[in-house]
Amino acid sequence: MGFPFTKAAAILDTLTKNGFRAYVVGGAVRDYLLGRRIHDIDIATSARPADVVALFKKTIPVGIEHGTVMVVCGGHEYEVTTFRSEKGYDDFRHPNTVTFETSLEKDVMRRDFTINALAMDRSGHVIDLFGGQEDLKRKVIRTVGPAEERIAEDPLRIMRGIRFTSELGFELGRAEFDAFRDHCRLLKKISVERIDQEMTRLLAGAFARGALQLLIQTGCLHVLPVLEGPIDETELLRVRFSLLQSDEERWAAFLSATGVTGIHHFAKAWKWSRSREKAVFLLQKYDSLRQSAGWDRVSVYFAGPDRAKAVERLQAAFQRETSDILKDRLNEIDRLWRALPIHARGELAVTGHDLKEWSEEKPGPWMSEALAQIEKEVILGSVSNRWEDIQTWFKVWRKQSRRY
């Protein structure tokens, strides 16, 4: 086997030529063996942080106190970390003590799962001290060492383990399942931001249904913020998350399936960004409108084609529509959008300044109301988007409204 991480080869070569050992470790090796797309490439080395900084032209001390230096090479960034062991996790995340080591063996012993404890040297040889390759073949998630110990160090490993089942389609080992179930309440020790990251990736996994079932079976689901109460588990497990194309769509489906109605309360508890909260809120709003009225020119205009299509995927995810009907609905949204004379208020042939001149009135709430009505009439085709036609319409509207 040759060395597949060609872009990182120069880093390993530099380290080894200077008398240090160096390996690609963790997820990159795992994903290479699985034939998956490789994202970040992490490197473990016997070199101390100061050595790494001295050997490379451009480095960033992202976690130098814990042995990690970011090396910029060939336009790419690589985390290069000194072999280390860890001891004591009073805050359930950070080790009380980090000791730099001289052997790879000590380093991989601190890792979470066997499939993440794999390493590859510059020749392409895989070093596997905990049966990670066999677990890849068996499609099972096992911890490095006793599951209780790994969880006590960082309870987020519960969510990570279940998230890996969603992304890879693997099963939890029996001991891991029991430990996750017995210690699920330790998740309350974890910051909600870290849980949110794992949950977002879990919902996006190709095998999300199985992972959600594990969350239910281990009791983890009801430990998560705002989800302590009764949940219709059958409804949650029948959602076809694979049809959804964005994090916002998946979260909207999850909240609908779990019966969460207070979006703002949930978003605050999970510390969502304002943009995500708004996106999920609007999806649920238009989902309700879609169920009651369907799509027309006005609703597609104000929702926008992307959000309208997202709503249709939500409908299909709850099996309210077949795949063929979904395709027809998406095509209908495109047709309605193309047929619109304008696609934003800024495309109107008139502005508030025109209305002010026509009415000889001071700007006020009436102007926003008039522009909104003009916008709607143009969308419906009741008046053409021409300056003269809108002026004529406005004069009639102003007279009929009897407000000026």
Image (tube, helix red, strand yellow):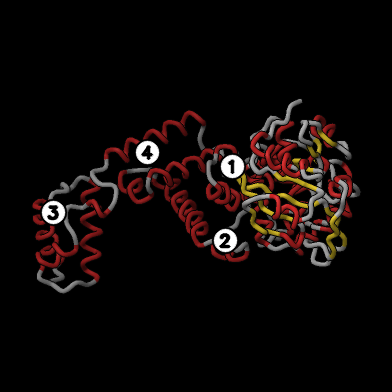
Q: Which of the two marks, 2 or 1, is nearer to us in this view?
A: 1
Is 359 on the left-hand or right-hand side of 53? left
Q: Residue at x 66, y 44 (%)?
A: 40
Callout 1 crowding tier (Cα within 10 Å): few <14, some 14–19, many ≥20:
few
Q: Earlier in the sequence, mark 3 or mark 1?
A: 1
Q: Amino acid at mark 1?
A: Gly
Say which of 403 and 155 sits in front: 155
* Cα distance in 3D space between marks 4 and 3: 27 Å
Q: Which of the two marks, 3 or 2, is nearer to us in this view?
A: 2
Callout 3 crowding tier (Cα within 10 Å): few <14, some 14–19, many ≥20:
many
Where is 319 relative to 397, above or below? Answer: above
Secondary structure beneath disc 2?
loop
Residue 366 - label? none
Q: Amino acid at mark 2?
A: Trp
Residue at which label 2 appears: 272
Q: Quadrant of the N terminus?
A: top right
Residue at which label 1 appears: 74
Q: Residue at x 70, y 50 (%)?
A: 55
* Cα distance in 3D space between marks 2 and 1: 35 Å
Is 41 on the left-hand or right-hand side of 361? right
Q: Residue at x 16, y 64 (%)?
A: 353
* Cα distance in 3D space between marks 4 and 2: 30 Å
* Image x and y of residue 13, in percent: 73, 39
Q: Residue at x 70, y 31 (%)?
A: 4
Residue 333 - label? 4
Q: Which of the two marks, 3 or 1, is nearer to us in this view?
A: 1
* Image x and y of residue 53, in percent: 70, 55
Q: Earlier in the sequence, mark 3 or mark 2?
A: 2
Q: Earlier in the sequence, mark 4 or mark 3?
A: 4
Q: Earlier in the sequence, mark 4 or mark 2?
A: 2
